[in-house]
Protein backbone atom coordinates (compact mmCIF):
# COMPACT_ATOMS: atom_id res chain seq x y z
CA UNK A 1 0.00 0.00 0.00
CA UNK A 2 2.73 2.51 0.88
CA UNK A 3 4.57 1.58 -2.31
CA UNK A 4 1.47 2.22 -4.43
CA UNK A 5 0.97 5.58 -2.73
CA UNK A 6 4.56 6.57 -3.33
CA UNK A 7 4.32 5.55 -6.98
CA UNK A 8 1.17 7.65 -7.34
CA UNK A 9 2.86 10.66 -5.78
CA UNK A 10 5.89 10.15 -7.99
CA UNK A 11 3.72 10.06 -11.10
CA UNK A 12 1.98 13.27 -10.04
CA UNK A 13 5.36 14.90 -9.40
CA UNK A 14 6.45 13.84 -12.87
CA UNK A 15 3.55 15.80 -14.33
CA UNK A 16 3.96 18.95 -12.18
CA UNK A 17 7.70 19.18 -11.54
CA UNK A 18 8.22 21.35 -14.61
CA UNK A 19 5.95 23.94 -13.05
CA UNK A 20 7.68 24.03 -9.68
CA UNK A 21 11.36 23.41 -10.43
CA UNK A 22 11.89 26.57 -12.56
CA UNK A 23 10.18 28.67 -9.87
CA UNK A 24 12.45 27.24 -7.16
CA UNK A 25 15.55 27.67 -9.32
CA UNK A 26 14.71 31.26 -10.19
CA UNK A 27 14.09 32.19 -6.59
CA UNK A 28 17.26 30.51 -5.34
CA UNK A 29 19.44 32.17 -7.97
CA UNK A 30 17.81 35.58 -8.07
CA UNK A 31 19.64 38.48 -9.66
CA UNK A 32 20.53 40.93 -6.84
CA UNK A 33 20.66 43.78 -9.35
CA UNK A 34 16.90 43.59 -9.76
CA UNK A 35 16.42 44.44 -6.08
CA UNK A 36 16.34 47.96 -4.67
CA UNK A 37 15.76 48.42 -0.97
CA UNK A 38 13.30 51.19 -0.15
CA UNK A 39 13.00 51.78 3.62
CA UNK A 40 9.81 53.83 3.24
CA UNK A 41 7.69 55.27 0.44
CA UNK A 42 8.76 58.87 1.00
CA UNK A 43 12.41 57.92 0.39
CA UNK A 44 11.74 56.25 -2.97
CA UNK A 45 12.97 59.29 -4.88
CA UNK A 46 16.00 59.40 -7.14
CA UNK A 47 15.27 63.01 -8.08
CA UNK A 48 12.84 65.45 -6.49
CA UNK A 49 9.18 65.76 -7.50
CA UNK A 50 9.94 69.36 -8.41
CA UNK A 51 12.54 68.21 -10.95
CA UNK A 52 10.12 65.66 -12.43
CA UNK A 53 7.38 68.28 -12.71
CA UNK A 54 9.81 70.77 -14.24
CA UNK A 55 10.80 68.27 -16.93
CA UNK A 56 7.20 67.40 -17.80
CA UNK A 57 6.18 71.06 -18.01
CA UNK A 58 9.19 71.86 -20.17
CA UNK A 59 8.50 69.04 -22.64
CA UNK A 60 4.71 69.50 -22.70
CA UNK A 61 5.02 73.25 -23.19
CA UNK A 62 7.37 72.69 -26.14
CA UNK A 63 4.90 70.19 -27.64
CA UNK A 64 2.06 72.68 -27.14
CA UNK A 65 3.96 75.45 -28.93
CA UNK A 66 4.85 73.07 -31.74
CA UNK A 67 1.13 72.28 -32.16
CA UNK A 68 0.04 75.89 -31.64
CA UNK A 69 -1.84 76.12 -34.95
CA UNK A 70 -4.05 73.22 -33.79
CA UNK A 71 -4.80 74.73 -30.38
CA UNK A 72 -7.22 77.49 -31.42
CA UNK A 73 -10.27 75.99 -29.67
CA UNK A 74 -8.32 75.43 -26.47
CA UNK A 75 -6.88 78.94 -26.55
CA UNK A 76 -10.38 80.46 -26.57
CA UNK A 77 -10.98 78.85 -23.16
CA UNK A 78 -7.77 80.09 -21.53
CA UNK A 79 -7.29 83.38 -19.65
CA UNK A 80 -5.71 86.22 -21.63
CA UNK A 81 -2.62 86.08 -19.43
CA UNK A 82 -2.01 82.43 -20.36
CA UNK A 83 -2.57 83.07 -24.07
CA UNK A 84 -0.19 86.02 -23.94
CA UNK A 85 2.44 83.86 -22.27
CA UNK A 86 2.39 81.31 -25.08
CA UNK A 87 2.36 83.99 -27.76
CA UNK A 88 5.40 85.60 -26.17
CA UNK A 89 7.20 82.25 -25.93
CA UNK A 90 6.42 81.46 -29.55
CA UNK A 91 7.55 84.90 -30.68
CA UNK A 92 10.88 84.40 -28.91
CA UNK A 93 11.24 80.94 -30.44
CA UNK A 94 10.67 82.34 -33.91
CA UNK A 95 12.96 85.32 -33.38
CA UNK A 96 10.31 87.92 -32.75
CA UNK A 97 7.91 87.00 -35.57
CA UNK A 98 4.40 88.15 -34.55
CA UNK A 99 2.21 85.09 -34.10
CA UNK A 100 -1.21 86.42 -35.10
CA UNK A 101 0.04 87.82 -38.42
CA UNK A 102 2.32 84.96 -39.42
CA UNK A 103 0.78 81.70 -38.17
CA UNK A 104 1.10 80.16 -41.61
CA UNK A 105 4.89 80.53 -41.40
CA UNK A 106 5.20 78.31 -38.35
CA UNK A 107 7.02 75.04 -39.04
CA UNK A 108 6.20 71.95 -37.03
CA UNK A 109 8.49 69.17 -35.88
CA UNK A 110 7.93 65.55 -35.00
CA UNK A 111 7.43 64.89 -31.25
CA UNK A 112 10.73 63.04 -30.97
CA UNK A 113 12.48 66.05 -32.51
CA UNK A 114 10.84 68.32 -29.92
CA UNK A 115 12.08 65.99 -27.18
CA UNK A 116 15.62 66.19 -28.55
CA UNK A 117 15.50 69.98 -28.85
CA UNK A 118 14.13 70.29 -25.30
CA UNK A 119 16.09 67.68 -23.29
CA UNK A 120 19.01 66.88 -25.58
CA UNK A 121 17.99 63.30 -26.35
CA UNK A 122 15.16 61.31 -27.90
CA UNK A 123 13.83 57.83 -27.15
CA UNK A 124 11.67 55.33 -29.02
CA UNK A 125 10.42 51.78 -28.73
CA UNK A 126 11.90 49.13 -30.98
CA UNK A 127 12.70 45.41 -30.98
CA UNK A 128 14.86 44.61 -27.97
CA UNK A 129 18.40 43.28 -28.33
CA UNK A 130 17.74 40.98 -25.35
CA UNK A 131 16.73 37.43 -26.20
CA UNK A 132 12.96 36.86 -25.92
CA UNK A 133 12.46 40.36 -24.51
CA UNK A 134 10.12 41.57 -27.26
CA UNK A 135 10.15 45.34 -27.54
CA UNK A 136 12.41 47.69 -25.65
CA UNK A 137 13.11 51.42 -25.38
CA UNK A 138 16.24 52.92 -26.93
CA UNK A 139 17.96 56.28 -26.99
CA UNK A 140 17.79 57.17 -30.67
CA UNK A 141 19.64 60.48 -30.57
CA UNK A 142 21.74 62.51 -28.15
CA UNK A 143 23.00 61.69 -24.65
CA UNK A 144 20.95 61.18 -21.48
CA UNK A 145 22.42 62.86 -18.38
CA UNK A 146 22.24 61.11 -15.03
CA UNK A 147 19.00 61.85 -13.19
CA UNK A 148 17.01 62.71 -16.31
CA UNK A 149 13.37 61.70 -16.83
CA UNK A 150 13.48 59.41 -19.87
CA UNK A 151 9.93 58.05 -20.10
CA UNK A 152 6.49 57.83 -18.51
CA UNK A 153 4.49 54.67 -17.78
CA UNK A 154 1.16 55.21 -19.58
CA UNK A 155 -2.17 53.56 -18.86
CA UNK A 156 -5.36 53.45 -16.84
CA UNK A 157 -4.86 54.01 -13.10
CA UNK A 158 -6.79 51.65 -10.80
CA UNK A 159 -7.23 51.97 -7.06
CA UNK A 160 -6.69 48.77 -5.03
CA UNK A 161 -10.42 48.09 -4.75
CA UNK A 162 -11.34 48.65 -8.41
CA UNK A 163 -12.05 45.79 -10.87
CA UNK A 164 -9.14 44.80 -13.08
CA UNK A 165 -9.49 41.01 -13.29
CA UNK A 166 -10.44 40.69 -16.97
CA UNK A 167 -7.92 43.33 -18.03
CA UNK A 168 -5.18 41.44 -16.16
CA UNK A 169 -5.62 38.09 -17.93
CA UNK A 170 -2.49 37.45 -20.00
CA UNK A 171 -1.44 41.06 -19.47
CA UNK A 172 2.28 41.66 -18.71
CA UNK A 173 1.89 45.45 -18.58
CA UNK A 174 0.13 45.88 -15.22
CA UNK A 175 2.38 47.89 -12.94
CA UNK A 176 1.89 47.88 -9.18
CA UNK A 177 2.87 51.03 -7.29
CA UNK A 178 4.16 51.05 -3.72
CA UNK A 179 0.74 52.02 -2.34
CA UNK A 180 -1.03 49.22 -4.22
CA UNK A 181 -2.36 51.41 -7.02
CA UNK A 182 -2.21 49.61 -10.39
CA UNK A 183 -1.43 51.05 -13.83
CA UNK A 184 -2.52 49.07 -16.89
CA UNK A 185 -0.08 49.99 -19.65
CA UNK A 186 -1.34 47.50 -22.23
CA UNK A 187 -2.05 49.18 -25.58
CA UNK A 188 -4.17 46.31 -26.92
CA UNK A 189 -7.38 44.40 -26.21
CA UNK A 190 -9.79 45.28 -23.43
CA UNK A 191 -7.18 47.52 -21.78
CA UNK A 192 -7.15 49.72 -24.87
CA UNK A 193 -10.96 49.87 -24.93
CA UNK A 194 -11.16 50.84 -21.25
CA UNK A 195 -8.58 53.62 -21.63
CA UNK A 196 -10.30 55.10 -24.68
CA UNK A 197 -13.65 55.00 -22.87
CA UNK A 198 -12.29 56.84 -19.83
CA UNK A 199 -10.48 59.31 -22.08
CA UNK A 200 -13.72 60.24 -23.85
CA UNK A 201 -15.62 60.39 -20.55
CA UNK A 202 -13.31 63.00 -19.01
CA UNK A 203 -13.04 65.31 -22.02
CA UNK A 204 -14.41 68.82 -21.47
CA UNK A 205 -15.27 70.20 -24.90
CA UNK A 206 -11.93 70.81 -26.67
CA UNK A 207 -9.99 70.21 -23.45
CA UNK A 208 -8.52 66.72 -23.25
CA UNK A 209 -7.69 65.51 -19.75
CA UNK A 210 -5.29 62.84 -21.03
CA UNK A 211 -3.43 61.60 -24.09
CA UNK A 212 -4.63 58.50 -25.93
CA UNK A 213 -2.17 58.63 -28.84
CA UNK A 214 0.20 56.24 -27.03
CA UNK A 215 -2.31 53.56 -28.07
CA UNK A 216 -1.47 54.30 -31.72
CA UNK A 217 1.63 54.48 -33.89
CA UNK A 218 1.42 58.31 -33.93
CA UNK A 219 2.45 59.18 -30.36
CA UNK A 220 2.09 62.87 -29.45
CA UNK A 221 4.01 62.54 -26.18
CA UNK A 222 7.36 60.92 -27.01
CA UNK A 223 7.95 60.06 -23.34
CA UNK A 224 4.92 57.72 -23.21
CA UNK A 225 6.86 54.51 -23.90
CA UNK A 226 7.74 53.48 -20.33
CA UNK A 227 5.75 50.25 -20.40
CA UNK A 228 8.28 48.86 -22.90
CA UNK A 229 11.34 49.50 -20.75
CA UNK A 230 12.73 46.03 -19.99
CA UNK A 231 14.13 44.79 -16.68
CA UNK A 232 17.83 44.19 -16.34
CA UNK A 233 19.31 40.73 -16.85
CA UNK A 234 22.32 38.79 -15.56
CA UNK A 235 24.27 40.04 -18.56
CA UNK A 236 23.10 43.64 -18.57
CA UNK A 237 22.71 45.80 -15.49
CA UNK A 238 19.88 48.34 -15.20
CA UNK A 239 20.62 51.87 -16.41
CA UNK A 240 17.24 53.31 -15.37
CA UNK A 241 14.87 52.93 -12.42
CA UNK A 242 11.25 53.88 -11.90
CA UNK A 243 9.99 56.63 -9.66
CA UNK A 244 6.40 57.34 -8.66
CA UNK A 245 4.98 60.82 -9.15
CA UNK A 246 1.56 62.33 -8.49
CA UNK A 247 0.58 65.00 -11.00
CA UNK A 248 -0.48 68.06 -8.94
CA UNK A 249 -4.05 69.36 -9.12
CA UNK A 250 -2.75 72.72 -10.37
CA UNK A 251 -1.19 71.16 -13.49
CA UNK A 252 -1.93 73.47 -16.48
CA UNK A 253 -5.20 72.32 -18.03
CA UNK A 254 -4.01 73.02 -21.58
CA UNK A 255 -1.07 70.62 -21.09
CA UNK A 256 -3.10 67.69 -19.74
CA UNK A 257 -3.63 66.58 -23.34
CA UNK A 258 -0.10 65.12 -23.14
CA UNK A 259 -0.57 63.15 -19.90
CA UNK A 260 -0.68 59.42 -20.84
CA UNK A 261 -2.62 58.36 -17.72
CA UNK A 262 -6.26 58.45 -16.70
CA UNK A 263 -8.16 57.33 -13.62
CA UNK A 264 -10.52 54.40 -13.99
CA UNK A 265 -13.06 56.11 -11.71
CA UNK A 266 -14.27 59.58 -12.59
CA UNK A 267 -14.01 60.79 -8.97
CA UNK A 268 -10.39 59.64 -8.61
CA UNK A 269 -8.17 62.03 -10.56
CA UNK A 270 -4.89 61.29 -8.77
Image (cartoon, rainbow, N blue to C red):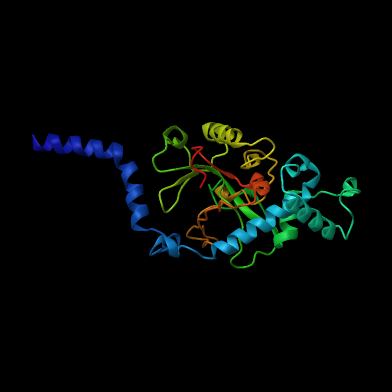
Give residue 230's position: percent from left, percent from top.
Answer: 53, 52
* In the foreground, 129 or 78: 78
Can you see residue 85?
yes
Q: Is residue 148 above or below residue 217?
A: below
Give residue 224's position: percent from left, percent from top.
Answer: 62, 48
* In the foreground, 106 or 140: 106
Q: Residue furthest left?
A: 1
Q: Quadrant where the N terminus lies?
A: top left
* In the foreground, 181 or 138: 181
Q: How many numbered marks appear?
A: 0
Q: Residue furthest bottom?
A: 146
- Residue at 68% x, 47% y: name it: 254
Give residue 235's position: percent from left, percent from top.
Answer: 51, 61
Residue 10 placement: quadrant: top left
- Residue at 49% x, 42% y: name it: 268
Give residue 161's position: percent from left, percent from top.
Answer: 39, 40
- In this rendering, position of residue 79 left or right of residue 173: right
- Residue at 44% x, 35% y: name it: 169
- Residue at 48% x, 39% y: name it: 171
- In this rendering, position of residue 177 left or right of residue 94: left
- In this rendering, position of residue 266 left or right of residue 6: right
Can you see residue 239?
no
Amino acid sequence: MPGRLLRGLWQRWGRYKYRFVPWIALNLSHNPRTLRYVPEESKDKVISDEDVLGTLLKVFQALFLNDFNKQSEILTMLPESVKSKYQDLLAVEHQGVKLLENRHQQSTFKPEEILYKTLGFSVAQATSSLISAGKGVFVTKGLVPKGAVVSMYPGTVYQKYEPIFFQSIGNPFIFRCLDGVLIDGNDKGISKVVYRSCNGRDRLGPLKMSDSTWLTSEIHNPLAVGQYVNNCSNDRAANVCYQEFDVPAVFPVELKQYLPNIAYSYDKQR
